[in-house]
């Protein structure tokens, strides 16, 4: 057996990343149209964040579980590929059902199911690159994933506009009904999602656990900087202390929000609830730590969370302030552009639906620029380094989001999307390139799942406070949610400069 992982050809890397295009096709359809669907079914834009919290909540729960399970799976389909396929099947079914939802609660429920399914497919793809590629090819793998994310997102976001403008399909519908342009886009998305993932499952064969173990052993022998496989067990006493502290803080926050609920927003209960949840999780881990059982999956995941490599801890803050603005953009772009740039908040009006379609074009544009940036960023990295390149890209993205407030002609918002596209491509690749070399192969899945915490937690925070800020601080003007996002992304860029690279 070869002692180190062989380098793969471009076509092999292409095939193993191609499924991400399908995943992003479904994800982009959701991002560009969920606010439109919810508003059509009667939701107030102040409640859009709370309704769209499905994505971060399901990601927070599903991704580390799937990561841990896939680390310990091996069957006829392989290690990661079973999860690609199962998630794609469920997500495709949800894409067909969601635009036919008769009521708001049905659409919200289908969003949760769709997000859970997308996360089942998505999480193992990150670990898949670490499994299949030697260290020097991993940046290429993540960059190619970003490229496919950009392509899939571009086409998916443009679908309602294409159906309306070029195929003459109706872009308006009666009160409480989803336009045919949106329905047909979701149907096409279901087909593309499943087909793209199936191609990766069919065309790419995985290394067995024994082969991966041999590769890692060789890396530890010949690369002094390699990260050894270490599992640090946290004591029951430390978990108990953390459980008491976090639960107490959460209860106090809940009491304060309840006492001043006339002046605060009920969505803030999400924030206090998550604090309590983390306390309870540590209490459960403490009970497992006291058990005589040698190991338990939940306890192992909690131990790994507290034993994150230093590079991962530093990147966590970068991810946190990078994804907060993306959630703000996905949820508030439709109400912001339709009300601020098109002057309509009525989902049944032609002007509102014209603005909503333009948001789809803007989302398609930033995904298109993401694909271009995926080619440009490696060149920028060679001229500088990973940290400086990420800083530049996040700065461009922050300025792009903030510019929504000063641009009056919606056509010129396309220029804003250049910066957002470069930031998005960088967010999807550079942090993973910085992180991958700090992780052992046998925990690639679980740590990629834990890393997702710092993508989902800022989105949960956004769902908790953005509605409050927009309604109580910014006089019901959703355009300011995008300004807040721009400031957050610039801060993320600054935090990148303090990350220490693992070699």
Image (cartoon, rainbow, N blue to C red):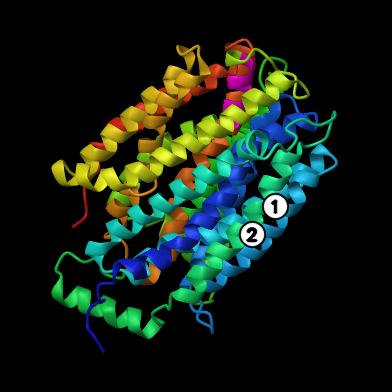
Q: Residue furthest bottom?
A: 1
Q: Is residue 246 visible?
A: yes
Q: Secondary structure at mark 1?
A: helix
Across and down, in percent, residue 238 comes to 45, 54
Q: Are dots 1 and 2 in contact, CB under 8 Å?
A: yes
At a point 40% along the width and 81% down the height, the residue shown is 209
Q: CA distance from mark 1 to mark 2?
A: 7 Å
Q: Looking at this view, is 32 or 220 the one in front?
A: 32
Q: Left or right: 272 with respect to 238? A: right
Magenta region: which residues?
331-339
Q: Which residue is mark 2?
A: 191
The crowd level at tag 1 (other Cα within 10 Å; few <14, some 14-19, many 20+) is: some
- Above or below residue 115? Residue 487 is above
Quadrant, the N terminus: bottom left
Q: Circle 2 — which element?
A: helix
Camera-side residue: 268 or 106? 106
Asked if residue 53 is positioned above or below residue 294 in the image, the reply reads above
Q: x, y percentage for residue 243?
A: 54, 48
Is residue 298 at all visible to an observer of this figure? no
Image quarter of residue 252: top right
- Residue ID for mark 1: 187
Where residue 278 appears, x then y in whole percent? 55, 47
Which quadrant is home to the C terminus?
bottom left
Q: Position of residue 342 (x, y in %)?
A: 62, 15
> Was residue 244 drawn as part of the magenta stretch in this picture?
no
Question: Does 336 appear in magenta?
Answer: yes
Q: Which secondary structure dominates the residues rendered in magenta?
A: helix
User: Is residue 96 positioned above or below 417 on the image?
Assistant: below
Q: Give the image quarter of residue 283.
A: bottom right
- Residue at the image point whose x is 71% and y is 59% from the top: 93
What residue is drawn where x is 76% and y is 20%?
Answer: 349
Q: Nearer the viewer, residue 56 or 113?
A: 113
């Amino acid at each position: 057996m070869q002692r180190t992982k062989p380098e793969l050809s471009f076509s092999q890397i292409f095939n193993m990343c191609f499924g991400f295009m399908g995943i992003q096709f479904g994800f982009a359809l959701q991002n560009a149209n969920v606010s439109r669907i919810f508003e059509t079914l009667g939701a107030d834009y102040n409640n859009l964040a709370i309704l769209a919290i499905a994505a971060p909540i399901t990601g927070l729960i599903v991704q580390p579980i799937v990561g841990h399970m896939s680390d310990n799976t091996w069957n006829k389909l392989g290690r990661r590929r079973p999860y690609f396929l199962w998630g794609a099947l469920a997500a495709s079914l949800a894409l067909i059902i969601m635009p036919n939802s008769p009521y708001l609660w049905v659409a919200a429920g289908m969003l949760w199911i769709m997000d859970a399914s997308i996360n089942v497919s998505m999480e193992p793809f990150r670990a898949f690159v670490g499994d299949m590629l030697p260290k020097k090819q991993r940046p290429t793998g993540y960059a190619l994933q970003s490229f496919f994310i950009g392509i899939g997102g571009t086409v998916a976001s443009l679908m309602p506009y294409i159906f309306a403008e070029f195929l003459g399909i109706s872009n308006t519908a009666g009160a409480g009904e989803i336009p045919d342009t949106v329905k047909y886009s979701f149907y096409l998305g279901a087909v593309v999602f499943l087909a793209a993932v199936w191609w990766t499952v069919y065309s790419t064969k995985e290394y067995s656990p024994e082969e991966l173990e041999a590769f890692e052993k060789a890396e530890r022998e010949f690369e002094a900087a390699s990260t050894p496989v270490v599992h640090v067990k946290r004591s029951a006493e430390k978990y108990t202390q953390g459980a008491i502290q976090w639960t107490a803080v959460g209860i106090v926050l809940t009491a304060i929000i309840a006492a001043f609920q006339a002046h605060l927003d009920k969505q803030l209960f999400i924030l206090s609830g998550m604090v309590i949840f983390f306390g309870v999780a540590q209490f459960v881990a403490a009970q497992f730590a006291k058990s005589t059982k040698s190991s338990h999956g939940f306890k192992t995941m909690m131990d790994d969370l507290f034993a994150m490599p230093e590079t991962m801890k530093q990147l966590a803050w970068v991810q946190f302030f990078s994804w907060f603005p993306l959630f703000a953009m996905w949820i508030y772009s439709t109400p912001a552009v339709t009300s601020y740039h098109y002057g309509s908040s009525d989902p049944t009006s032609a002007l509102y639906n014209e603005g909503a379609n333009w948001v789809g074009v803007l989302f398609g544009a930033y995904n298109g620029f993401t694909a271009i940036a995926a080619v440009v960023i490696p060149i920028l990295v060679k001229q500088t380094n990973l940290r400086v390149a990420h800083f530049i890209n996040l700065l461009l993205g922050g300025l792009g989001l903030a510019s929504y407030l000063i641009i009056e002609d919606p056509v010129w918002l396309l220029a804003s999307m250049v910066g957002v596209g470069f930031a998005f491509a960088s967010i999807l690749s550079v942090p993973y390139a910085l992180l991958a070399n700090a992780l052992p192969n046998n925990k690639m899945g679980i740590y990629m799942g834990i890393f997702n915490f710092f993508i989902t937690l800022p989105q949960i925070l956004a769902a908790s406070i953005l509605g409050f800020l927009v309604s109580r601080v910014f006089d019901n003007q959703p355009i300011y949610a995008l300004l807040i996002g721009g400031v957050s992304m610039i801060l993320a860029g600054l935090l990148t400069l303090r990350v220490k690279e693992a070699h």
